[in-house]
Amino acid sequence: MVIIIRMLVNNIKFAIKSRRFWWYTATSRTRARFARTTLGSFWLGFSNLLSIVTLGIVYGTVFSVENFKSYFIYLGIGLVIWNSISASISNAPDLFSHNSQNIKNLNLNKLFYTLEEWAFQIQTFFQSFFLVFLTFLFFEKIIIINLLTSSLIPFINLILFLYWFPLLIGLIGIRYTDFVQLVPIILQLVFLTSPILYKKENLGGIAWITDYNLIYKILDPFRTSIIEGTIDYRISLLTFFINLLGIYLSFFLLERYTKKLPFLV
């Protein structure tokens, strides 16, 4: 127990002490991504808005939606959150292999690479979310009040999940290389069975599958808190506890693989 606490404390201390370093390198990646473009990172928001409009019209028609304004907000917020989670998980299997030269040649805490990737995904999420949310704010003013009063715990759960789950996927990916090919397939299946393009009730008799969908349990409370201004504290606190367990598990595995990483990447 003492060893576990010491590991967690040391990792948290390192994250805090090196925060400027890993946040700066993530920011550099974000800037380089849209270097020489006129609109810069606003392209993230525009691409999301274009997807939302297109999917909203198509699926709104397919599902015979009566209130398109509410549907667009429901779809849009869900899609932005999903895109961030999906991007984090998709990049996760290559997290350490992309940094293989640094891992082999630099005596740097391996936690740094995970924090830098986490910061990059958080920055990407904010840039995407900001423009989409600002657009919806013109049509539904109440969502800003809901965001400020009801979304804190679901938001924290999302941010924590964006750290430990991709890290766990990345550690599995370096140990079992075939897993890299499996990730996009699983993500596609999860997307199709998650109420993002449609409402949960549209699943009918198989709606129970969402109860075992961890990504949906992260996505839906945050979306619901923004749209409806409500929060299920029981679910949110349970999710927070799962996040804490996930962080411990990912830290434990990272510690276990630290010495082996240079030979695995």
Image: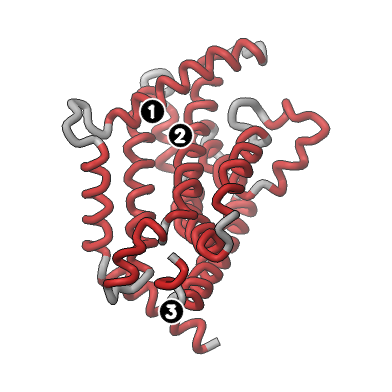
Q: Earlier in the sequence, mark 3 or mark 1?
A: 1
Measure how far apart labels 3 and 1 are at the Cα level. 43 Å
Q: Which label sits on residue 192? A: none
- Tag 1 residue: 132
For the point 63% across and 44% down, the residue is 186
Decide: few, some or many residues near mark 2? Use Cα within 10 Å; few <14, some 14-19, many ≥20: many
Decide: few, some or many residues near mark 1? Use Cα within 10 Å; few <14, some 14-19, many ≥20: many
Q: Earlier in the sequence, mark 2 or mark 3?
A: 2
Q: Position of residue 98 (x, y in %)?
A: 37, 56
Is residue 150 visible in the rendered image? The answer is: no
Measure how far apart labels 2 and 3 are at the Cα level. 37 Å
Residue 110 lies in what quarter of the image? bottom left
Amino acid type at image mark 2: Val
Which quadrant does the N terminus fall into? bottom right
For the point 64% across and 26% down, the residue is 198
Decide: few, some or many residues near mark 3? Use Cα within 10 Å; few <14, some 14-19, many ≥20: few
- Tag 2 residue: 80
In this rendering, would 103 be left or right of 76?
left
Marks 1 and 2: CB-CB under 8 Å? Answer: yes
Q: Position of residue 81 (x, y in %)?
A: 48, 38
In this rendering, would 141 be left or right of 68?
left
Amino acid type at image mark 1: Val
- Tag 3 residue: 259
Amino acid type at image mark 3: Lys
Q: Earlier in the sequence, mark 1 or mark 2?
A: 2
Q: Nearer the viewer, mark 2 or mark 3?
A: 3
Q: Is residue 139 above or below residue 238?
A: above
Q: Is residue 179 above or below residue 2?
A: above
For the point 60% across and 26% down, the residue is 197
Q: Nearer the viewer, mark 3 or mark 1?
A: 3
Q: Is residue 70 above or below residue 98?
A: above
Label total for image: 3
